[in-house]
Amino acid sequence: MKQFSVFLPNKVGAMLEVVKLLSMQNTHVVALSVSESTDSAIARIIASDPARVEKLFHEKNVPFGVSEVVVVEMREVATQLVKLLAALVMAEVNVHFAYPAANPATRLRGNRAARGRHRMRVLGADG
């Protein structure tokens, strides 16, 4: 699965423009995280149709980066999150960020983790 890092100006309505662009193509944001600074923001997006998003962002000259994520289903977050994080520790993988889902039915949580020169992304879903 692909995660898009979209570079936005830090202004009211910037995220709305991106979501509307996707929505007009019948593509939906499944998970979202936004980190901002004084002048800009980075929106990390998991979308329902990554191939369409990538093509659309290229066509519309939306500045973005792409990284692969792995999806993990967790039926009981309280106990399975501990197991998932313990497995990451045993693999000496550090978690760098997490984000909640935009869609409450999916309730995705995401983590970007890195180990040495190897990068790994983990996305857990509780369903």
Image (spheres, helix red, strand yellow):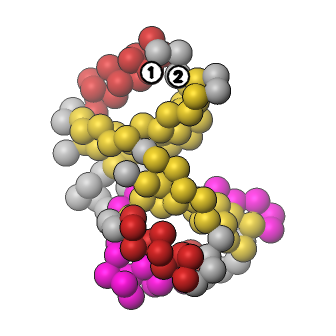
Q: Measured from the top left, where is residue 110 in percent x and y?
A: 44, 44
| Mark 2, other Cα within 10 Å: few <14 / some 14–19 / many ≥20 | many
Q: Secondary structure at mark 2?
A: loop
Q: Residue at x 47, y 15 (%)?
A: 91
Residue 79 lies, with reference to residue 67, above or below; the image says above
Q: Amino acid at mark 2?
A: Val
Considering depth in this image, is 88 or 77 the residue closer to the camera? 88
23 magenta-colored: yes
Q: Are marks 1 and 2 in contact (CB under 8 Å)?
A: yes
> Which disc number belongs to residue 88?
1
Residue 61 lies, with reference to residue 75, above or below; the image says below
Residue 93 lies, with reference to residue 33, above or below; the image says above
Left or right of 120, for residue 62? right
Q: Secondary structure at mark 1?
A: helix
Q: How far is the residue under mark 1 from the one under mark 2?
A: 5 Å
Label 2 sits on residue: 93
Q: Measured from the top left, where is residue 21 in percent x and y?
A: 47, 84
Residue 69 in sight in this render? yes
